[in-house]
Image (cartoon, rainbow, N blue to C red):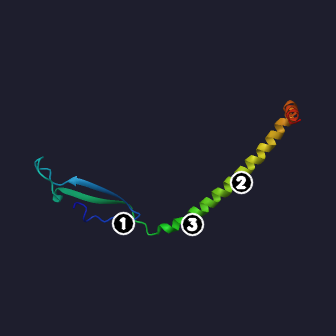
Amino acid sequence: MLFDKIEMKLGGSYLISISVADRTKPLGAKPTKDDFIIRLHTITQESSLHMFWLLPQYVIITAGEIMFSITGLEFSYSQVIQLELNSELRHPSKMNTKCRAQI
């Protein structure tokens, strides 16, 4: 197999480059593994931390987003009520039609 001597570890980022070693062979000849040069380039070193350490970060971020969204919804709900009351006070004709509709 071509990739027998390549070792990649978890959490690392790698680039494999394959080039032709012997360009003098005829086109119809069957290639062997000695005809190629295989290089492994390490882009990012493998990780020494376990993936479990991401869990507390996700819990904290999720709790923060929940608290932020609840506060935002509460604020927008309170502002909508004030805007509706202000619009009724500015336009008494709307208020009269609502009162007539309720009677």
- SS for tag 2? helix
Q: Mark 1 sits on what residue?
A: 9
Of residue 4 and residue 19, the one placed in the foreground of this image is 4
Q: Earlier in the sequence, mark 1 or mark 3?
A: 1
Of residue 45 and residue 4, the one placed in the foreground of this image is 4
Q: Mark 2 sits on what residue?
A: 71
The residue under label 3 is which amino acid type? Pro
Query: Do the residues bearing badges 1 and 3 touch, measured as CB atoms within 8 Å?
Result: no
Identify the residue at horizontal 11%, vertical 50% (top origin).
29
Residue 57: quarter of image? bottom right
Q: Earlier in the sequence, mark 3 or mark 2?
A: 3
Q: Mark 3 sits on what residue?
A: 56
Gap in Å between the C-alphas at discs 3 and 2?
A: 23 Å
Identify the residue at horizontal 86%, vertical 34% (top origin).
95
39 lies above or below 50:
above
Query: Do the residues bearing badges 3 and 2 touch, measured as CB atoms within 8 Å?
Result: no
